[in-house]
Image (tube, rainbow, N blue to C red):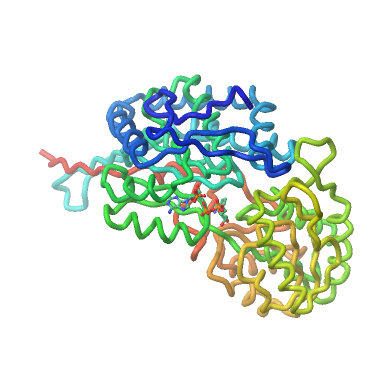
């Protein structure tokens, strides 16, 4: 860990916080402090903003091919450094090394994808209907951006924003979550090595998010906010962005339904459930939160899922053979414990797990609850832990109504072997993404995002770069 930068990255240089403040980063598997990183305040934020604003004009004029090649080089450096980055992520966030390696590949892929998109930004030209004017349409970067990321995918949530911002020609300030600043600082180091000009990316690590971000959003020089995090914080940032009419993209929370029909292939459904529930220890916005299983197969599904969940090995992410690492911190674990206790009080059966172990680290065992009461608190909030809550249903209309009965709409999972039903149910779900007979939807080439209170805009896919581009229309008289 000693080689990873721990200072702020502003204008292409490493610097301490202006007031010298630092903050500790700990390993959730042991509680031990692994690093102290610079803890930025408002003055540092202003310096980062100055750097991003100054770099914007020149960066916007850089040839798309040059931007593309920087991303391509960074993609290759990330892959070369897979092991080191995976260890870093496991140390600051807890996920098992195998999953961390998977995230490194996923994160790198956003750079490759957007290196390919950087050279495909299109415009348009034509004669207007009245025949008197030509219309020339060009695409321009939206301007300096503020990128705010959560702790659950420390590398990928960064590259998913930085990639399209670089491709579009925007400069940026990245503010990572205070639990996982090291992955973002490592990314800055990689992009510098890949040739990114000074000031294009600035990284401001801080425990004082409000003090750092609010003036940036209200000040009028930052033109775009791309946020991934909870709906509550997203709502606050939308309000702050309103004053200077800052363009926003919001990737917020979810409450994913996972629906298993009576005609589903149960092996596929259980495989899908393991992925949709256990990726990242359940600490994912895409995590299946409510398992609706047809009454005729609910007991069998619960039995098979419990068998698989119970066989997972819980422990520090660096240990060989570990499938499930610690949760991010004690607050996160206490939330999971309280949600399980509430469900059990309301009559849920614990099929496996259900009790946090004694000792250091924020571990929680894979848990399956059956006969969950629909009024349980975990039905209306993201569990963000390895807990599968099963409810039985009787018919299609009923399950669609229950699945949609939430303010969120990020993703849903549907398991059925019937083509008509698969399409009909998917189309009626109020979500931005559907996993049809699969428990994994995330892919850099697909537009990721939700409806309702799960967010605004999409990341990845062909549309991902659009979030960082404006149109300019030129009217030119036909002579
Ligand atoms: P969070 O508490 O909303 O924090 C997310 C980020 O926002 C952190 O960097 C946080 O820093 C920052 N933040 C908090 N208050 C702020 C403020 N007033 N001004 C500026 N920044 C502020 O979420 P989290 O607990 O880190 O992450 C989990 C949430 O993210 C879940 O709801 C999950 O569903 C969602 N998520 C969504 C997606 C998606 O693509 N839709 C992907 C991953 C995660 P501080 O911690 O210092 O406050």
Seen as rendered, the residue at the extreme left is 479
Quadrant position of residue 347: bottom right
Q: Is residue 325 visible?
A: yes
Horizontal side of residue 231 vs 215, given as left or right:
right
Q: How many marks?
A: 0
Residue at 29% x, 51% y is 218
Horizontal side of residue 258 vs 223, given as left or right:
right
**Percent position of residue 261, x then y:** 76, 69
Residue at 49% x, 34% y is 114
**Percent position of residue 414, x then y:** 70, 63
Above or below, 78 against 246 in this view is: above
Residue at 40% x, 51% y is 210
Q: Is residue 164 visible?
A: no
Residue at 76% x, 35% y is 318
Horizontal side of residue 444 vs 97, given as left or right:
left
**Percent position of residue 139, x then y:** 32, 39
Quadrant position of residue 122: top left
Q: Nearer the viewer, residue 223 or 128?
A: 223
Quadrant that contains the N terminus: top right
């Amino acid at each position: 860990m000693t080689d990873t930068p721990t200072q702020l990255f502003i204008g292409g240089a490493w610097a301490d916080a202006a007031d010298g403040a630092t903050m500790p980063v700990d390993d959730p598997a042991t509680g031990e402090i692994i690093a102290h990183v610079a803890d930025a305040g408002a003055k540092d934020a202003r310096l980062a903003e100055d750097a991003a604003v100054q770099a914007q004009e020149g960066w916007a004029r850089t040839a798309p091919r040059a931007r593309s090649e920087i991303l391509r080089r960074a993609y290759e450096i990330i892959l070369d450094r897979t092991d080191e980055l995976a260890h870093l992520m496991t140390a600051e966030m807890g996920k098992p090394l195998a999953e961390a390696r998977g995230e490194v590949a996923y994160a790198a892929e956003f750079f490759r994808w957007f290196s390919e998109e950087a050279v495909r930004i299109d415009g348009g030209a034509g004669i207007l209907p009245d025949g008197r004017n030509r219309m020339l349409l060009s695409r321009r970067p939206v301007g300096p951006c503020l990128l705010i990321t959560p702790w659950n995918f420390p590398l990928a949530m960064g590259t998913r924003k930085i990639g399209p911002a670089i491709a579009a020609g925007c400069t940026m300030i990245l503010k990572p979550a205070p639990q996982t600043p090291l992955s973002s600082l490592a990314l800055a180091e990689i992009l510098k090595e890949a040739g990114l000009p000074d000031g294009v990316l600035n990284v401001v690590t801080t425990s004082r998010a409000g003090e750092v971000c609010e003036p940036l959003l209200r000040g009028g020089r930052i033109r775009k906010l791309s946020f991934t995090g909870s709906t509550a914080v997203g709502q606050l940032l939308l309000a702050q962005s309103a004053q200077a009419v800052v363009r926003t993209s919001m990737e917020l929370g979810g409450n994913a339904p996972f629906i298993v029909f009576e005609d589903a292939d149960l092996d596929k459904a259980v495989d899908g459930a393991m992925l949709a529930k256990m990726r990242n220890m359940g600490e994912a916005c895409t995590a299946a939160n409510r398992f609706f299983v047809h009454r005729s197969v609910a007991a069998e599904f619960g039995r098979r899922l419990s068998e698989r969940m119970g066989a997972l090995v819980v422990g520090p992410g660096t240990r060989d053979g570990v499938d499930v690492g610690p949760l991010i911190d004690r607050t996160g674990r206490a939330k999971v414990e309280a949600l399980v206790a509430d469900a059990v009080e309301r009559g849920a059966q614990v099929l496996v797990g259900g009790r946090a172990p004694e000792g250091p680290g924020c571990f929680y065992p894979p848990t399956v609850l059956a006969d969950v009461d629909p009024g349980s608190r975990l039905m209306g909030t993201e569990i963000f832990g390895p807990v599968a809550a099963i409810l039985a249903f009787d018919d299609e209309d009923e399950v669609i109504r229950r699945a949609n009965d939430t303010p969120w709409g990020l993703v849903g999972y549907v398991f059925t072997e019937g083509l008509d039903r698969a399409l009909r149910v998917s189309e009626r779900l109020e979500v931005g993404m559907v996993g049809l007979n699969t428990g994994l939807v995330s892919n850099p080439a697909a537009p990721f995002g939700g409806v309702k209170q799960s967010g605004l805009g999409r990341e990845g896919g062909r549309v991902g770069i659009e979030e960082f581009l404006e149109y300019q229309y030129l009217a030119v008289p036909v002579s």
